[in-house]
Amino acid sequence: MGIFKRKDSKTSIQTDKDDFDSGSAHSGRTSNASLKSPSYRSNITLPVSIPEVPVPNPPDPNLDPAGYLRSIHAVRERSRIVLEKAKQNRLNHFDVDMTKFHATASYVVSIIKRDYGSDYQSIPPHGRWQHFDVGGRPRIVQLLQSWPSRIDSLERTRRLVDLFVISVLLDAGAGNKWSYKSKESGKIFNRSEGLAVASLEMFKSGMFSSNPEEHCQVDTAGLRKITVTALAKGMQHSDQNPLEGLEGRHGLLMRLADALGNQKLFGANGRPGNMVDYLLSHPTTLASSVPIVTIPTLWSVLMDGLGSIWPSSRTQVEGVSIGDAWPCSSLPQSPPAELWESIAPFHKLTQWLCYSIMVPMTRLMNIHFAGTELLTGLPEYRNGGLLIDTGLLTLKDEDMKRGVEAYKANAEVTGQPSMEVVPMFSADDDVIVEWRAATVGFLDELLEEVNRQLGLHGEDALTLAQLLEAGTWKGGREMAAVSRPNTKEPPIMIISDGTVF
């Protein structure tokens, strides 16, 4: 991870694949603190001053409630209402022990110090890139180096965005019984890293491409030729090695194929990576010494361009599907409140996608992003599980009983082993929605407390993306392994349809 370096007052520009070598770093440009965009070591020095870029406000929820709930701004704003109730121990499904908050932050600090010492600037932003490198093998760097030098940085970026989009969308929870044996190394991986390696090897084999001369791309025609059977084979799914939500993942890929038909965003051949060209030519993109793209512009591409991939059964407002957004009893209820006020939006996979594809765009083309502070912590079971396993949140007895009964019923149907029983709920259950909203809010609070305990502030303070990468997500996984060593499952199980978590 040494090639990753958080922004400081002097950073550097990189221009081609040679920048992926582990040569010495050179500093030379000053940057704007508000961008919160990571920088990377390079062998080229170029002084650049990055100007301020205004970030647009969200739609007015009273005039365009669906547009507001689909905006990135709404995730934090709605979750903060639930957070304030949590801090007063007024949640409907969880007891909150705020005396455990300091200890939770201290545990996160211990994880960061253990893995990074005091070299906090080396912490990379949270993203899919690190999952590809599981086991210490730099698979993405090796992939880049395998392409001929005639492939320019723009096409390299398109290809990585193709890969990262498909990999993130296949990254819903895999379940506790599934694993993937790498065809290249013979090593076995599970969970998110297993899904990453599986998607990379399928990508390299040309599974997502319609061009027999170029395997390393994703396009509409390539996706449409994928069957459930082919996906199952690529993922090594079987009765003995079951991948949760296989059909849901396949349906997601088919809907993605349709969404990529938007030629304005994804080009004539329908490649996710063509969004790079769209972003660079967008009127809100500042063509300064380096390209500066606003997060709302990127967010609009992902939400509007890919919005149709989410199941139509999800929450709708005024006939518009909102995506990963759900009614929450801890928010104001209608009436007298408006309908939109009772909905908690998360857009977890879209945010995970946003975090992930910014890395190759920044690293290969030095694109900077204005407004990254709008992105929130990811409301999934590792970050949320940390809050439960440290005792900050405790599921109330009535919900615990209901969830355990659901877990046992599910075990009987699917043949899952009845061990380490934990409560189980569907993704739209109010327990899960409240848990996720509280998670988003507490991650912001933890960022502030972790930086305080580390003595970091201003330019030196960790970003939320770094906290997720080095602390909460990793800490949540490690706590699960200690608390439930046989399965390493989260403290609450979520029934997955292959499109959430």
Image: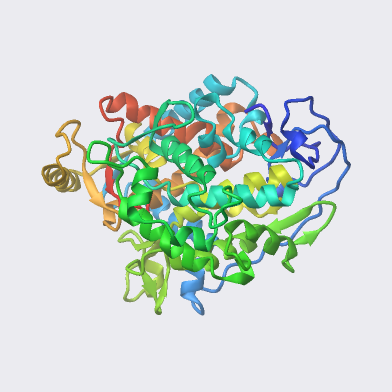
Using residue 493 as the reference point, say whether residue 172 is left or right of it. right
Q: Is residue 326 above or below residue 422?
A: below
Q: Quadrant of residue 460?
A: top right
Residue at x 57%, y 41% (from the top left corner):
465
Q: x, y (%) of residue 271? A: 58, 60
Can see residue 459?
yes
Q: Is residue 32 left or right of residue 121?
A: right
Q: Position of residue 51 (x, y in %)?
A: 81, 54
- Residue lying at 40% horizontally and 69% vertically, measured from the top left: 341
Residue 71 placed where, x, y %? Answer: 53, 64
Quarter assignment of residue 192: top left
Instruction: Indicate the position of residue 276 as horizontal and vertical percent values.
Output: 67, 57
Horizontal side, residue 233 vs residue 406: left or right: right
Residue 425 as seen in the image, left or right of residue 474: left
Judge whether 44 appears above or below 330 on screen: above
Residue located at (34% from left, 40% from top): 236
Q: Is residue 88 visible?
A: no
- Residue 266: quarter of image: bottom right
